[in-house]
Amino acid sequence: MNTGIIPEGVEGIVLHPEDTLTDLIPWLGRLNLLALHFPKAGDGRPYSMARQLRGRYGYHGELRAVGDVRADQLDAMRRCGFSSFVLSAGELATPAMRYLQGPRAYPHWQDPAAIPG
């Protein structure tokens, strides 16, 4: 992301894990789309960015996960505030839809909540 002024008419940008959110804050109100790039599936920085954008900065626009996005990450992405995603090449849409539908639709679902007892 270029930390300069975002030109008038630009409605969305791509953020990389090394980008800082504080430079973006003055323009959040006029950006309809923020695409957060996952350079590899195990990189957790875009999750943290999504939580900060939704919670701390009150961003209400679309947060899209792009890059190395796997079907088994979708529930965690949704819980962090992502509203859309672009699956990596080779990822199938059917398993992705099952993850988004929740535990009854996916037989190998693991609930992230702690087990009581």
Image (cartoon, helix red, strand yellow):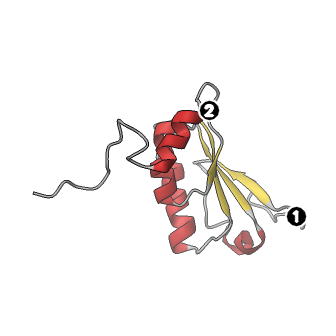
List the single residue furthest toward the left. 117
Question: Residue 78: x, y in percent?
Answer: 51, 55
Question: Residue 45: x, y in percent?
Answer: 50, 49
Mark 2 closeness class: few <14, some 14–19, many ≥20 residues within 10 Å: some
The relative height of residue 72 versus residue 51 in the rendered view (above or below) is above
Question: Residue 50: x, y in percent?
Answer: 55, 59
Quarter holding the C terminus? bottom left
Give the residue type at disc 1. Answer: Pro
Residue at 70%, 70% in the rendered image: 28
The relative height of residue 11 versus residue 35 in the rendered view (above or below) is below
Residue at 64%, 71% in the rendered image: 60
List the single residue furthest toward the top. 90
Mark 1 closeness class: few <14, some 14–19, many ≥20 residues within 10 Å: few
The image's mark for residue 7 is 1
Secondary structure of the residue carrying tag 2 is: loop
The image's mark for residue 88 is 2
On the rendered structure, is 110 left or right of 8?
Answer: left
On the rendered structure, is 62 left or right of 5?
Answer: left
Residue at 58%, 29% in the rendered image: 91
Task: Judge by depth and name the residue closer to the eye, 9 or 81.
Answer: 81
Secondary structure of the residue carrying tag 1 is: loop
Question: Of discs 2 and 1, which sits in the foreground?
Answer: 2
The image's mark for residue 32 is none
On the rendered structure, is 11 left or right of 21?
Answer: right
Question: Residue 88: x, y in percent?
Answer: 62, 32
